[in-house]
Each structure stands twice: as structure tokens, then as C-alpha cells.
Image: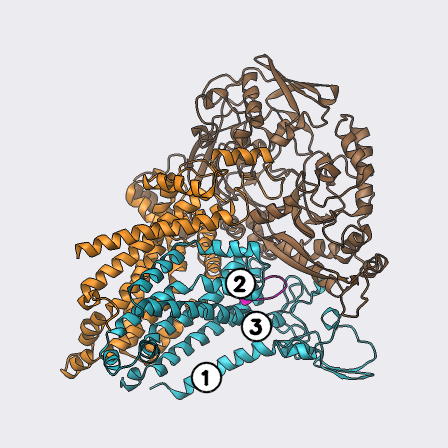
Amino acid sequence: MIAYLFRRLLVAGSTLVGITLVTFVVLHLTPGEPALGLDVETRGPDPATIQALRTRYGLDRPLAVQYLDWAGRVARLDFGRSMVDHRPVRTRILERLPRTLALNLAALGIIFTVAIPLGALSAARRDSAIDRAAGFTLSTLYALPSFWVALLLQAGLAVGLGWFPLAGPASEGAAAWNLPARWLDGLWHMALPVFCLSYGSLAFVARFARANLLEALASESVRSARSRGLGPGRVLWRHALGQSWIPFLTLAGLLLPTLVSGSVLIERIFAWPGLGALLYESLFTRDYPTILGLTVLSATLVVAGTLITDILYLLADPRLRRPARAS
Amino acid sequence: MIPRRKMRLGTLALMVLAAVALGAPLLANDRPLILLRGEGLQFPALGEIPLLGRLLEQPGWSRRDWSLPQQSERWRLAPPIPYSYRQVSLADRYAPPSWRHILGADALGRDLAARVIHGTTVSLQVGLVSTSVALAIGVLLGALAGFSGRAADFVVSRGIEVALAFPTFFLLLAVLSFLPPSVPLLAVVIGLTRWPSLARYTRAEVMRLARAPLVEAARAAGAGPARVLFLHILPHSLTPVLVAATFQMAGAMLVEAGLSFLGFGVPEPLPSWGGLLSQAQGSGRWWLVLFPGLALTLAITTIQTLGDQYRDKLDPRLSRLQP
Amino acid sequence: MKGHAAIAVTLMAALAGCGTPESGTPTLRAYLSSEPASLNAVTQGDFNTEIIAKLVGDTLVDFDARLNIVPRLADSWDVEGDGRRVVFHLHPGVNWHDGVPFTADDVAFTLEKVLDPASLAAGKRPYFETVTGWQVLDDNTVEISRNEPYARAVEVWAMLPILARHVYAGQDFLEAAANRSPVGTGPYRFVEWQAGSSLELAANPDYFGPRPGIPRIIFRPLPDPATRVAALLAGDLDFTSLRPVDRERIQADPDLSRRVRITQVERLFVWYIAWNQDGSNPFFTDPRVRRAMTQALDREGFVRDVLQGAGQVATSLVHPAMWSFRADIEPWPFDRRAAAGLLDAAGWEDHDGDGLRDRNGTPFSFTLLMPVGNQELIRAMTLLQESLRTLGVEMAIHKLEYNLYRADRDAGRFAAMAGGWVLDTDPDCYDFWHSSQARGSGINYASYKDAEVDTLCAEARRLVDRDERAAMYGRVQEIIHRDQPNTFLAYRDTLLGLSRRLQGVEGSPRSVWGSYPGPLNWRLEAETP
């Protein structure tokens, strides 16, 4: 087991290297120059300035050297400096990380607490009016583009009724308030963006839950539990849910990286200073260090997601420990 | 049991969608369906039908101004909506729905009904092509990873992780910087960013089923690995994969809508539903928001309903279950 | 309407146990279209940086709302040798916000930094490249010399906020703390910048110039134009630029028009299409073809219907608000028949009967390059595309993100290219039309070549006399109109939506913020209950 863990960690490390290598190469092969903070509707940078930038950030060295240098520094948690504002990439990311985490944690929380019970209910009352109504409502919700819903909500609930703030992460002057007030204010500002981030995934997770629970309900053990005269509620929660937690784990592993991957559209519309907008801007300005820093962050979560899922699988089902090829 | 009526309705809706997508040039076009000229009958609108139209198309048709009477024209039968999706008319700018423009007109006076109808072709193409790409790669790699032993699993799983962590939007930028934009290209790129989750679901399901008694039995009976995989494992593992795939198809259309909002949608002057919605932004004209939104919602809901039904039909165990 | 919000805010303030300390100070709520990377306008050339830098800092001279050059840090200046030598006499007794006296040496420091390629001052350096020396004559006098005459020797200082040498001493110029918490001499002091959330400025009570009418400004980064308009309507923002559709919507709704005032202001901005004449395509070397393109596009309709009158049909890179504008040149009218005739005359006829014009076997089919994200420009190009289609010319539209667009544009990798251009206050056309500035070496993107224009552009920038220059630039406009190296779509005006309480805003063709004393004359009126 220890040896297995060690091996998996080693693999995870090499995967990280692979991801950064691929991103690094694709990034540098894509045309475009690091932007120098100029509006596009004016003249572009002169050659001397471009050369100065390339020298400053070592872009004139061979790619392999650049990568090794970068990787070496990342190993010491130094992500270099942004080519746009010349601040450490780590500072730039940490500045935005809490806001992105807050938004995505809230969205994920809502998705799971609403969607799984709803999916379970749909599965238990399969083809009933509730099942159909839930399915229809959720798939209609899913079909609405988020930027469109966001703008409608802004027009209706923020501008029209004034119930929610229009945009931004905090009220004016909120920095001077005490902690509970700042928290409340933050939650209030999060309401609309969180809704826009979560409503679409509700349908997906609810259906996922419904499908897997239906399958579990059809399985031998559940049928035998049912035949033993257990109540439908007990059958559903104890036996069916208990059986289908492996697919749920896969799903959770897949969703882990979304914690740090913001949505450009929602962040733009609600002026939310998150990592999605940072990545988007960095791509356009070819801010290589920032793009790579963000890639390391999301890659770490991707790898961690797989790792954790695999380990839990292992604990759940010792048979999986055998090699997959059982001839 | 699945209600028969609902089943037919879903299938019917899909067939209508497909018919609109394929027959868009016959439903909304500035070209006449039938044109009687001195030298005989012509069918200009048929020339724009995907694939088959090539045979009927005549040189110069695509550049003609069909709203004017043609040379030696005697009689014409116009399509139900006598506008093409690209024809501009500033005089009709933001015309509200009326007999002239049944769904209204957009900022350049283009007929919205024509654009929504032709948008069906574009949006379904984006959805179908990208899902096919994602499904092909995802199921293949997922099955490979789940079934073909550790080495394959290792390679594929690392590949999935690389794909998941790579900034997907950047892939689009990178591809578009080398290739001219087109609907199929956009669809393929969207598909390329969406296979990892399908691969993961497939892998997990295949791994689970590879241990199932049924499969062990088949193996014991001497079935080869390919036979086991394709006959005994894949059909059963498709349950969650197909549910996910219907979402992928709908999701791809939404991705295209989002890209349109950011300016990276299908190239001008082709309409897509998402593109129509994002062009409607800030116009304050309800018809521009309502009709494309309705089309998008209806299509996505239809696809999802069908996905559900397909799953129910495919999985015999579920059919046996009495609610 | 806003009652609930007010209740919620009061609730929170009550929870916080105190009101906001500055709640009594009248505050202008302004926006930044994106968060600036730095507040150092020497290294950072974008519009948002410039807004802050010119409130916290000062330039030597500036433009008033009529585009006249007015004194700012410099009280007066002497120009000799057609701009070869300029002496600035600085305002005495000015202090930096940290109390250190401002001197001519700070001007020298700023100039050093602009000329040093390591400062990455790409936006500013081209205007100072011919500077060969500078001399601090005394604390309040500085002399700048150039190796050749330069008509704009004084006005280019309007784009350069002066930086303090002592603040940057011993620090890397690009990484200095002052780039995010600047120390200036300007009318506003920097208070606080909360990344992603807000940037606060407060009036400088010791300012040497006119007293700012608004005591406090809070900028919020609002990247989405629709969000900005919504914020204005919700009362969270005091002004923003509007799209034509927003104006229509607000004017149609009495409740909204009660809350928002709209003004239309000229702006030094033009939409254009450059036709590549470097010989890489067989179409656009012939001026008849370029004029056909211009006449195939319904520019009047574009201005009337798409811009809703927020602009006017353009003829060149000289804006009507500039002293050098030739008002007597009539733009080519929209005339598809004339366009067809010009194409025929140039040999582009449909020889093979496929509906597409061709010459020597080459069909008239080209791709137009444009940046993503601008609905107006896309609409104009769609109009052109559709008009050309029935004229037998095929135009594909290739939208690229800004970085790739700029790369292709600057290297001349296009047959046709559409874009917008922020015009300079001076008609200097050397960079735009001189043949030496073609293809990658300058901003003559269309690779236009004309001997007379070359001479005029090279000569007129070396003169200081306005009348002489006006005559020469008038002739350039005439030739450009004749040759149509670019099709100029429209000078695009700004539509400003202002809250009722914001008064005294006088638009300037450079931008709302871009005049002096401009923003210092704004005031906020107490809101009528």
C-alpha cells in the first residue's frame, strides 16, 4: 500500500511536468508577442522595446533552456514575474484565489446539496410527475446560456428591483466594516454570480445521480433488500446511494479543478476579480509566466483529483488492486 | 415503462429539427423555390441544400440579387420565408414581428426567422460534430484505459490529465491563429476540449464491468478480449457515458454561444443560435432575445430527453424494473 | 426602487457597528474598462493607466477641451529652430505629494526613462526618439534639444506625466512600489488600490492649479460595457459611454431618462479599412478598385442606422475637430453602380460567367482581417460583404483576437484589414502615409506610396507655422481622398450617459478625462430627494 502510494505520487509529479511541458511548448509556438500594455487602436511596440522585453524575461534563449530554468524555479515555488505588471505571479494568483474559491465552493455546494437529493427523489419516483417536472425544469435551466441569464438577472434583480448588487466583489467602503458585516456583504455580492455558475450544472449532476441510482435500485442487493421488506426511503438512502458512490467519486474528482477555474463570462459580467478573467487576459497579452502559473495550479488540482479518487477506489474495492488484465 | 406517446414526441421533435437543419434553404431563402424563365424551369433554392445541392447549383447563383426580377422571368414560387439569412436591409433595422418579418428583423434588417432557421443547421452541426469527436476520442481512449492493461491505462490517464489542465480556450486561439475559421473547425476544436470527461466515465465504467460476473463468465467461456470488450462491456458501460454525451452535445452548443459572446463564434455572416443571442445583447428588442433563446432551449431539451429515453431503452435491466 | 439596497446597506453598516468614515464626502463613482497593470504611464501605454496617471501626476503641458495647448506643470515655453530646441519654464514651488519639492531634474529623469528601451515605454518612445539632449538649466528650467525640426515638440509632452526621481531611486523601474501607489504632483492624491475591486483618489488640497471640484473619486474595474450601462441606470456609476442602442432605450423610457442625461461628444477616433498595396495581392494596387470598395459600402447608412447618428462619414485620418481638417472634401457617396463601373474599368469583370469577377484567371476573392469583439465594426463589414457579394466580389471575414490581429496588421499580412484608430491631435501624417513607413517598419499598414504625399508629410512635420502646415495637410487629404489607400468609415462620436448629480462635464475629443482642467471643473450636486 505504501509502495503503491509512493508510486502514485511519483506518477503525479511526472504528470505535472508533462502538463507544464505541453502547455509551455504550445504557448511558445502560438504566434503573438507579449503585449506591452498598449491599446490595439494605437501603434504597436517598436523593435527596441520588444527586444528589451525579450532580454528582461529571457525569451531570446532556446526554448529548452527557458523551460528548464522555469521548471527549476517552480520547484522552489517561484513562479517568476508577470510580463504585464512585473509583479510576482504568485502574488497575482494569491490575490485572486480567495475570491475564486469562495465563488466556486459556494456554487459546488449548492449544486451538490440541491442536485443529489433531487436526483434521488427522481430515481425513487421514476416517471412520476415529480420526476418529469424536475427533469424538465432542470434541462430547461441547463439550456439557458449563462451570459444571457446573468444579464437578465442584472437587469431584473439588480437594476430593476435593487435586491442584489449589480457587480463587483464588495460594497463601497466595505473594507472599513467589521468581519461579520464584510462576510455578509461578500455573500450578498456572490448571490447572482453563484446562481449563474450553478444552475446549469444542477441538471447534469441531478441526472447523473438519477441514472446511477436507478441502476443501483435495479441491482441484486437492492432488490433483495426490497424483498426483505425494507421501506423505499431506507432502500434508497442506505443501499442504493451506498452502492453508487464510486461514480460519484469520479464526478467529484472531475469537479475538483473547477474550484480554481473561473468562468470568464460570469467574472466579466459581474466584474468579479477571479482567476478566469486573469487567465483570459493573460492569454491575450501572452503573459507566459502568469499563464504557466495558472496552469500549474489547475494541473495540481487535476492530478490531485485523480490521485484521491484512485486511492479511495482502492480502499473501497480491494479487488481493484489486482492488475486490470486478469487473463 | 416509457410512455409511448412521449417517446414519439421526442423522436418527432428531433426529426423536425433535422428536417429544418437540412431543409433550411427551402424554408427561408431569397432564391425562389421554382423559377419559370423563358428557357424553362429552374430550382435555385435547391442549389443551397447541403451536399445534394451541388448537383443543381448553377454558376453565378450565389452572387445574384434574387430580390430583383430575373432575366426573362415569368413566374416564381418563393419559399415560405422569402429572405436569406445574410440579406441586409437597413430600412428594416429592428423591425418588430409583423407579416413582413414574422419574427422581426435584427440590427442590419436581416430577417430573424431566416436566421433562426439557418441557425439550426449551424448549431446542430456544432453540436453533432463536436460530440462525435469528443465521443469517438473519449470512448476509445476510455475503453483502452479501462481494459487494455496498466500501461495503456497509465498513458491514457496521464493524457486525460494533460488535456484537463490545458487551458482549453487557448487551444481555440492557437488553432484559429493557423487555420481560417469555419463551422466544422470550430466544432472540432470544441470537441477536442470535451473528450476527457467522457474518457473518464468510460474508463471507470469499463473497469467496473470488467469485474462483473457476466463478463467473467464470458471470458471463462473463451471469448476473446475484443469480443468481451465490444459485446459484453462497452454496451453496458455506455449508460452514464451516453447521459454525459447528450449533455456534451447541448454543452457544445452553449460553448459556442459563450464563444460568440466573446467574439469567437462562427464566422460572419453565418448565424448560430448562440451568436444570435449574443448579438441581441443590449439591443432591448425582445424578439431578438426570445426566439433564438427559445430555439436553443427547445433543441437542447429535446436532445436531452432523447438521451434519457435512449438510455432507458438501451439498459434492459431498467426496463425490467417496475416502479 | 433602490429601497431594498439601501436597507441592506444600512443593515450591514449597523452590523459593522459604524458608518463608513468617509460617507459624508461627495464621491464620484467612476469606472476603468480594465484594471490597469500599473499606474506608471511611462511603461504602461493603455488608456486606463493614463486616466489615473494624469489625475495623480501632471504633464508639462496639456490640451483643453478645444484641443489648444495649455500650461500645466510648465508655465511657459520657448520654441526655437522649428522645435529643435524647447525650453520649459516650470511652475515654481510645486511639491510632490510626499512633500519633496518638484524640480526640473524630475523632468530629466522622466525623459531618461522614456528613452531607455529597458523601461518598455513603447507607447511614448516614438515621440521622443529624435531627442538628443536635455539640460537642467536651473530648478525651474529645462531645455530639450532634438536633432531635427519637429512640429510637435511641445505637445508631445501632454502625454507624459512627470515621475519623481527620488521615488524611483534605487528601485527597478518596472517593479517599483510607486507603480501601484504613485506619488505625483497632481490634483488628486492616491489613496488606496484594492486589486480587482476599487481604486480610490482624494483631492489634493495643496494643488498648485485649479482646485478639483470633486473631493473623492472611486474607480471600479468594470470590463463589460453592458454591466457599465446597467450600473449607470442602477445609480452605482456617475457616467459611462453608451452604445447607440443604450441611448435609444434610455430615451424611450421616461423613468430612465429622468435618471440619466445623455450627451454626444466628438472623439478623435475613426473606423477604417486598409487595402494592402504592397503587391502581395492583385486587387488593391489599383486606386479604382479601392474607390469601388469605398463606394460599395453604405457608409451613410452605417452612420445613420447602426451608429444612430453618433458619428459622421470620414474622409481621412484628420478629424473635423482638428485645425487641419478640410471640410470641403465630400466623401465618396454610396453608389453601387459607380463601384461596378470602376471594377469593370480596372479589368475586373466576370469573364468566365461564374458570377465572380476575375482578371487574368484570378477570381476577385479576398479575406478581410479584423479584431474580435466589436459589434459595430462587424456590422459595417457585414454590410460591405453583402454589398460586394452581389457585385461579384467575394470577401471573407477573419476575426482574430487582438494580439494576433496586431501581429498580422503590423507585419502587413493581410489583403484587407479593418480596425479603429485613436487619432493624434496633430495631423502629422509621416507615420501613416510615408512610403518608408510601409510593411512592418511603421504604421503605413496599407503600404501606400505616393511621391507627392511623401514630400508633403516629410516637410510639414518640420514646420511650426500652422497656416503653412494646414495648406500642406489639406493637399494630403485631397490626394488621400483621390487615391483611397484606406476606406474611412466613420469618425465615431462618444455617447456619454451621465447621472443627474454630475455637473460641469465638458466632453473633449480626446476623451472625457483627456482635457485640462476638464475633470477638475466637474462637481457633484447634492441628490434631490
Q: Which residue is mark 3?
A: B121
Tell whether A180 sits left or right of A151. Answer: left
Q: Report how far apart the C-alphas of labels 3 and 1 lie in the structure.
A: 21 Å
Q: Is residue A109 above or below residue B210?
A: above
* Percent position of residue C160, x then y: 59, 28
Please name whichever residue, A131 or A201, is drawn nearer the observer in this view of the structure.
A201
- Which element type, helix, strand or loop, lies under badge 2? helix
- Of the numbered discs 3 and 2, the one sitting upstream in the chain is 3
Instruction: Identify the chain of the residue marked 3, using the numbered disc in the image.
Output: B
Name the residue located 36 percent from the left edge and 46 percent from the top edge: A97
Colour representing chain B: cyan
Q: Which residue is mark 2?
A: B186
Number of residues whose C-alpha sits closer than 10 Å to that of mark 1, classed few (under 14), some (14–19) or many (20 or more): some
- The quadrant of the image that shows the N terminus of chain A is bottom left
Q: Hey, what amino acid is under mark 3?
A: Thr
Q: Hey, what amino acid is under mark 1?
A: Leu
Instruction: Identify the chain of the residue marked 1, using the numbered disc in the image.
Output: B
